Amino acid sequence: MNETIRELLARVGGLPVAVTELEDAADLYAAGLSSFASVQLMLAIEEAFDIEFPDSLLNRKSFASISAIEQTVAQIVKAREAA
Amino acid sequence: MSLPAFAADMTLGARARRVAEVAAENADRVDREARFPQEAVDAMRAERLLGIQVPISLGGEGASTQEIAEVCSILGQACAASAMVFAMHQIKVSSLVEHGGDSEWHRDFMRELCARQLLVASATTEGGIGGNLRNSICAIEIDGNICRLTKDATVISYGVHADVIMVTSRAHADAAPGDQVMTVFRKNQYTLEKTVDWDTLGMRGTCSDGFIFKGEAPVTQIFPKPFAEIAAQSMLASSHLLWSAVWYGIAADAVLRAQAFVRAAARKANGTTPPGALRLAETSNLLQLLKSNILSGLKAYEDAKAEPDQLSSMAFSIAMNNVKLASSETILTIINQAMIICGIMGYKNGTPYSLGRHLRDAHSAQLMISNDRILGNTSTMLLVQKPDTSLLG
């Protein structure tokens, strides 16, 4: 999952730095992720993992770092499997 | 004065109305001469309104956003420029209250703000960023315990009249444009070199000239939280809500004038309904919509404050954007209707029904953070956000 997220981030994130140089815990907003790019990233992740982010998870915190995105996606996938 | 009479006299509403009286007396002169509403701001200090939002434990009154909005609306009915100065000051204070509580320097500063009734201005706009306050070009330079900043601030409302300016910048020389901090500078810690004159259609008394800002202060005066968080969690909501409250005040006074005009006409009309009466009914309907819109926004903010996740959610940002869009557009329709009702007496300056100043001031609303930019942001969020279609939710 980490790899897919990194790929998508490299494609739509528009970051001024190389994604390979980012730690999992690095603050993506500080790295230059704009709010427009963060929405593009959300859309790409929804498509790639075939999920929909519930409104409660559509906030800055859920997308603050690569590991935060992983946790958010995992949480949604887990909830879907439980249902 | 008896104790109950004294208590009634000291309510926030009563104090705001006394300031509004002073503001109303000077409103036309402030507008004509494009000068700072000094009398009204002196009255705000005398009534100790500048520190009301600060918590009681730090010397303020812990006033809620709703209470502050009511003051904005009362002042807006008298002089939009005075009301906007008050609103902009309170928006800066909200950043201190919501994000400065963990820092000793900022807590001490809040105490001082209340004690000395300091007026706070904002320098978020910068030449070259295209109006997007979430980007900075300038960067703060940190040298041991001291920070230095130079900013081409194309707009600092009441810049020369403020005691303090809060300035945004990139967090350090290598930071991305969106990686920003905000720093509090006191008057003796900066210089302002005027670059742009504020000679505008309306809101002339806000004296929003442009300056080259140069400041130097201890690093402790930098807000401990990133500006992105401050902007998302307190500035967005408090700006849209308090501005809207000022705009509501302008529109409410316009409707009051139109109603007075229709009433005077009705008295002379011997039993027939004057022609403006129907239009007045339509206008009062719009004013009520405007009011409901702002009130629901204020309630959403108070509710969201209890849940930080809610505060940074897209649904909340969209709701606040919508409050701003609707209020800034509706006031123009309302005031225009009021002018049609009052006819030439509304169009002329210096009559009891004059509406020129109202209409000119109201035109600023769509441009204070351009509605097109806000629509653009909302449209991006709507690509992923799932709306809550319930009536009460």
Image (cartoon, grey):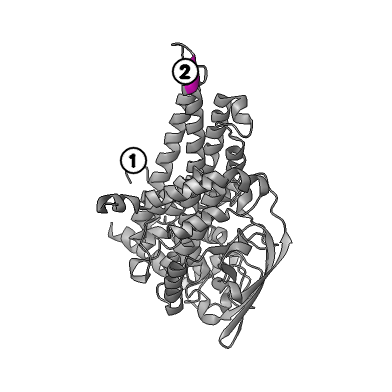
Q: Is residue B338 above or below residue B157?
A: above
Residue at 40%, 55% in the rendered image = B65
Front-most of B262 and B368? B262
Residue B255 shows in the view? yes
Residue at 46%, 14% in the rendered image = B273
Left or right: where does residue B120 sit relative to residue B294?
right
Front-most of A7 and B327? B327
Front-most of B225 and B316? B225
Residue of label 2: B266
The kind of secondary structure the magenta stretch mainly shows is helix
The picture places residue B217, in percent across and down from the top left corner, at: 58, 79
Residue of label 1: B391
Tag 1 and tag 2 share a subunit: yes
Residue A45 shows in the view? no
- Magenta-drawn segment: B264-268
Q: Disc 2 marks which amino acid?
A: Ala
Between marks 1 and 2 in the image, the one whose residue lies nearer the viewer: 2
CB contact under 8 Å: marks 1 and 2: no
The picture places residue B318, in percent across and down from the top left corner, at: 47, 50
